[in-house]
Amino acid sequence: MQVKVFESTDMASGLKKVKDDLGPDALILSTRTIKNGKLGLLGRPILEITAAIDRDTPLKNGAGKSRMDISPAFTLNPSPGFNHVVDESLDHLLHQSASGPGKGSDTSNQLNPASPALHSDHAIRNEVNELKNLVKGLAGEISQLHGKAADDVTTPAPATEQKKIDCSVDHFNTGHDDHILSMLTDRGINIETSRTICGFLRESLTDAEINNPHIVSSTIIETIQNLLEISPPLFSSKKDQHRIALVGPTGVGKTTTLAKIAASYLSSHSNSIALITVDTYRIAAVEQLKVYGEIMHIPVDVVITPDQLQHAIDCHRDKDLILIDTAGRSPKDDFCIEELSTFLSPELSIDKHLVLSATTRESELLNIMERFNSLGLKNTIFTKIDECINLGIMLNIQIQNPNPLSYATNGQRVPEDLIELSKKTVAELIMSEHQGLLHD
């Protein structure tokens, strides 16, 4: 058997070459499409036909030249990339080719649609097309990026982005509003309250008044006053007896504040005062209160149990004012707070004032108020306002605390550094540039 390989641009011309060379009785062993370009990828496709004929069959005179001759000893085991032998005569194949591809299908596909070589050819074509489409897509994206970069230089930010840029001043639309907002937040007033005050000023003042710093300052102070609840003890009332207990966490200055209230009452009203302490946890606290009592010539009683407190109150029924000092309690210690509540039972009609340090963080102050609220608190006292950088925290706490303010302390002097609060006093303290320093 003689085997030859032929190359052609299409199946029809290829089959004609086979017939001219090997005659009409030749058999087609396989067909495949190859690339003749560099790397075999982008070159022009060439159809390769492998045909054979019995060696005893004479070749037609003047047969065309083939690409290569394979020796008669060639075995018919197909190598990779070749199809199996197609057992059809060349005349039959030529007849199919002459009838036309039909319905747009390729003749090679009609020969063997399931041919691996043809599938490989389609895969290569698809890969090339995908590469071309990818290059086109990348080129288009690059051009769009260049165009967008040029637009960004001359086009202002979209409305949504502009809104994000302006969100720092929220709904305030003037530089004055921004200045007022910064001034309020610099005083320690939280952002929500500051915005509320700013919005009120913008609605209630004209542009000319907004430009006047004195009008703005006075309006802010008046607005803060409307947000405060103040209720100092009314010692001038004809109540039979005032009973006040100071409660709160450790280290806030309860004992010193109690002595200041006693000294203030002594200088403004009378010496009809009695001091009682249940702070037996700290010996120094008892001794400190006794020293204050000796200086002011007022009695000091030390009690250990709730019954002893009841007895001490009964013993001083002739006094106009009884001040009760308590031990500092951790807001996390529910047991100690519950124990304190047994001393300050509602039957004793004691006004409980929660003492807070202005230097404490706002979140911790809110937690302290929540923990001590089980005692039935009536008022709030702020201490150490002279050590606080800004006093806006007094307003922040007051807004979230239903108990009104009664006193504030701004130093260690007794009784000078005690402030009996009013709405105007607190508002001025908050807005003062020298906050907490009201004495000479």
Image (cartoon, rainbow, N blue to C red):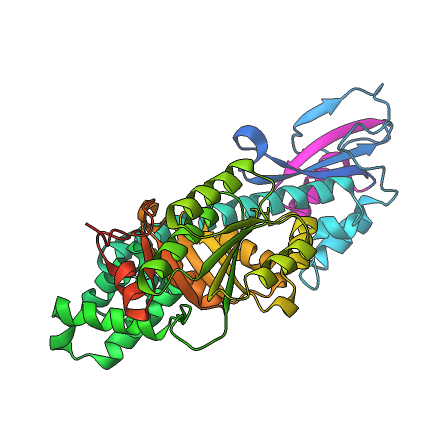
The image quadrant that residue 338 belongs to is bottom right
Q: Nearer the viewer, residue 269 or 80?
A: 269
Q: Is residue 163 left or right of residue 2?
A: left
In this view, 426 is above or below 247? below
Residue 357 makes an appearance in the image: no
Reply yes or no: does residue 4 show up in magenta.
yes
Image quarter (top left, top right, bottom left or bottom right) of the N terminus: top right
In this view, 421 is above or below 386? below
The image quadrant that residue 433 belongs to is bottom left
Q: Is residue 247 left or right of residue 304?
A: left
**Image location (x, y in percent) of residue 130:** 56, 47
The magenta span reads 1-24
Q: Residue at x 55, y 54 (%)?
A: 368
Q: Is residue 60 left or right of residue 400?
A: right
Q: Residue at x 77, y 54 (%)?
A: 95
Residue 242 makes an appearance in the image: yes
**Image location (x, y in percent) of residue 5:** 71, 31
Reply yes or no: does residue 78 show up in magenta.
no
